[in-house]
Amino acid sequence: MLEYIQKVFEGKIDFEGQNLVEQIVRITLFAATVVSFLLGFALQSLQVTFGAFSVVTVALFLVVLPPWPMYNRYPVQWLPAQDTKAK
C-alpha cells in the first residue's frame, strides 16, 4: 500500500511528456486569456473575466499536475554504469 502511494506521488514523466505539458499549458493559458478577456469585455464585468480564467486554470491544473501515463510514454533508458577502474 505504501509503495503504491509513493509511486503516485513520485510523479515521473519523461522529456517528451514535459514538452507535451508545456505545449498544453502555453496554448490553454493563451486561449483562456483571450476568451476570458472577450467575455469580460462583452459583458463589462471583471468578475466574469477572472471567473472564466480561474475555471480554466483549475481545469488545467487537473490535466497537467498529476503524472498521467500519457506523460511517460517514452521513458528514458539510461546506460548501465561503467566500471571506473583504470586498466
Image (cartoon, rainbow, N blue to C red):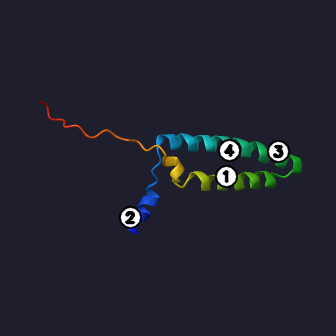
Give the side of residue 62 with respect to residue 18, left or right: right
Q: Pointer 1 and pointer 3: residues touching (CB < 8 Å)?
A: no
**Residue at the (49%, 46%) spot, across then down:** 73
Give the side of residue 63 with respect to residue 55, left or right: left
**Residue at the (46%, 60%) spot, across then down:** 8
Q: Amino acid at mark 1?
A: Thr
Give the side of residue 49 with respect to residue 2, left or right: right
* Mark 3 closeness class: few <14, some 14–19, many ≥20 residues within 10 Å: some
Query: SS at mark 4?
Result: helix
In this rendering, is residue 65 above or below 37? below
Query: SS at mark 2?
Result: helix
**Please, which residue is most extreme toward the left here?**
87
Distance of label 3 from label 4 (alpha carbons) = 14 Å
Distance of label 3 from label 2 (alpha carbons) = 47 Å
Q: Of callouts 1 and 3, which one flags the residue occurring earlier in the amino acid sequence?
A: 3
Q: Of callouts 3 and 4, which one flags the residue occurring earlier in the amino acid sequence?
A: 4
Q: Of callouts 1 and 2, which one flags the residue occurring earlier in the amino acid sequence?
A: 2
Which residue is nearer to you in this view: 87 or 44? 87
Disc 2 marks which residue?
3
Q: Pointer 1 and pointer 4: residues touching (CB < 8 Å)?
A: yes
**Please, which residue is most extreme toward the front here?**
73
Q: Indicate the quadrant where residue 47 lies.
A: bottom right
Q: Amino acid at mark 4?
A: Leu
User: The N terminus lies in which quarter of the figure?
Assistant: bottom left
Distance of label 1 from label 4 (alpha carbons) = 7 Å
**Residue at the (62%, 44%) spot, across then down:** 24
Q: Position of residue 64 (x, y in %)?
A: 58, 51
